[in-house]
Amino acid sequence: QVQLVESGGGLVQAGGSLRLSCVASGSTFSIMGWYRQAPGKERELVANINSGGGQTNYADYVKGRFTISRDNAKNAVYLQMNSLKPEDTAVYYCYGRRYLTSTWGQGTQVTVSS
């Protein structure tokens, strides 16, 4: 069974930091990354990273604040989030893509208070 399990969400004050983790099992993925979905909004890409870790892609609104990384030995991807803003409040979803198939985690809530 292919599965992605996120952890690390929580409540933090504006300006604070959180580190999200996502561990995959049952498959490896060429691309891994994070999306987020705020209440009443569509799911949007936050960042992704290729299998070698040398190619990353960030949404403009997180550039300079968030850093994505992966550990292939652990089949995991991470998202270090610094300088958090209230508008970063959302459910964050990990995903992995292998060929044309994407697998999603169950999501982890991040809430940033002002």
Image (cartoon, helix red, strand yellow):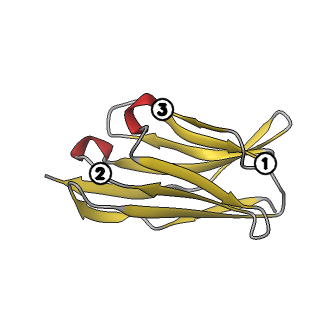
Amino acid found under the numbered disc labelled 2: Leu
Q: Gap in Å between the C-alphas at discs 3 and 1?
A: 19 Å
- Looking at the rendered structure, the number of numbered marks drawn on it comes to 3
At 35% from the left and 40% from the top, the residue drawn is 38
At 45% from the left and 63% from the top, the residue drawn is 19
Earlier along the polypeptide chain: callout 3 or callout 1?
1
Q: Gap in Å between the C-alphas at discs 1 and 2?
A: 27 Å
Q: Secondary structure at mark 1?
A: loop
Relative to 64, is 107 above or below? Answer: below
Res 59 label: 3
Q: Secondary structure at mark 3?
A: loop
Q: Secondary structure at mark 2?
A: loop
Q: Position of residue 63 (x, y in %)?
A: 43, 37
Mark 2: few/some/many CA within 10 Å (<14, 14-19, 20+): many
Mark 1: few/some/many CA within 10 Å (<14, 14-19, 20+): some
Q: Is residue 45 left or right of residue 91?
A: right
> Which residue is identified by label 2?
84
Amino acid found under the numbered disc labelled 1: Ser
Name the quadrant containing residue 55: top right
> Which residue is identified by label 1?
51
Relative to 40, is 49 above or below? Answer: below
Amino acid found under the numbered disc labelled 3: Ala
Name the quadrant containing residue 4: bottom right
At 39% from the left and 57% from the top, the residue drawn is 109
Q: Position of residue 3 (x, y in %)?
A: 72, 61
Res 96 label: none
Residue in front for this viewpoint, 107 or 66: 66
At 67% from the left and 44% from the top, the residue drawn is 49
- The reply to whether callout 2 and callout 3 are in contact (CB within 8 Å) is no
Relative to 114, is 76 above or below? Answer: below
Residue in front for this viewpoint, 101 or 18: 18
